[in-house]
Image (spheres, rainbow, N blue to C red):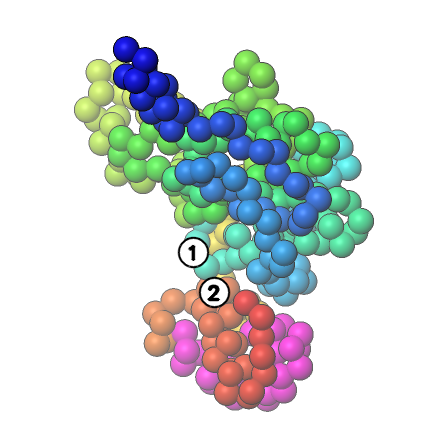
Amino acid sequence: MSDPLERIAAALDRMSPPPAEAPDFDAADAFVWHTDPDGLTAVPQVNRIALDLLIGVDRSRDTLLENTRQFARGLPANNALLWGARGMGKSSLVKAVHGAVNAEGLPLKVVELQREDLPSITRLLAHLRASDHRFLLFCDDLSFSHDDQHYKSLKAVLDGGIEGRPENVLFYATSNRRHLMPRDMIENERGSAINPSEAVEEKVSLSDRFGLWLGFHACSQDEYLAMIRGYCNAHGIEIDAETLRAEAIEWQATRGSRSGRVAWQYFTDLAGRRGVKVAG
């Protein structure tokens, strides 16, 4: 009987590995959370651009920066949802604000969490809660599809359950959708449910749990050109206004869109042609 019992015990040990060791949060200012096994990987250098190079998002920039400063100082602050047009600098703003706050001498760690790892968020929060540091928990491109139950895990950080959200953790997310789920999904559930309002209330109200909603909208042509000019000035690339305008407009026409991302892609091409190295 002992051999089968030993084999069962060994199998249970494999199924339930020991808890992960406490991470060394002094190793870096940025980390990426991963699972299987659980762990936090330090990011020595965050891929970001300077805050003053983000054009056309002044109001969102100022609001998010002040909210983050408050949190870094140990003051009350709101979880934030940055939503709207693709390529308009939502994730860039989060990373730039984190860098700006640290540059001001306000210590703040950022931890990136992938949407598919949301079910593990309770375990992550246990690590963060036990630390003396303050953390900005960041989830990029957050959205939910039909029958996606990951949104329930998100409530652990937005509402905190019986323990409450850790006082030293703030949550920022970006999404192309204001309500984090497709409009047709909302309408389908509303139309097929016995109680239409209750069918979608739980999912739609998830976005209401964010204290800050910051909207990002498509940029104008002048803003698009100003973004590129800002990149050129920051990296010492000289180009006359007429050439920049003609090339940049042709570039956006070939892409079929105009955004901060497209502006950066044109600038990357320009810098390459000029032999200038650019990080990111």
Work out how far the residue at label 2 is from the one at label 1, CA to CA, in angstroms.
8 Å
* CB under 8 Å between discs 2 and 1: yes
The front one of 62 and 15 is 15
Instruction: Based on the picture, tell me whether residue 245 belongs to the magenta stretch.
Output: yes
The residue that mark 2 highlights is 261
Q: Quadrant of residue 204?
A: top left
Dot 1 falls on a residue whose secondary structure is: loop
Is 119 on the left-hand or right-hand side of 280? Answer: left
Vertical side of 270 occupied by 68: above or below: above
Q: Amino acid at mark 1?
A: Arg
* Visible residue check, residue 253: yes
Q: Residue furthest right?
A: 105
Where is residue 140? Give x, y as percent: 47, 47
Q: Where the N terminus falls, by quadrant?
A: top left
Q: Which residues are magenta?
A: 228-252
Is 199 on the left-hand or right-hand side of 206? Answer: left
Disc number for residue 86? 1
Where is residue 3? Give x, y as percent: 30, 17
Q: Residues within 10 Å of mark 1 (few under 14, many from 20)?
A: some
| Residue at the (63%, 56%) spot, across then down | 44
Q: Amino acid at mark 2?
A: Arg
> Main SS type for the magenta part?
helix
| Residue at the (57%, 39%) spot, across then down | 137
The front one of 112 and 9 is 9
| Residue at the (66%, 81%) spot, across then down | 236
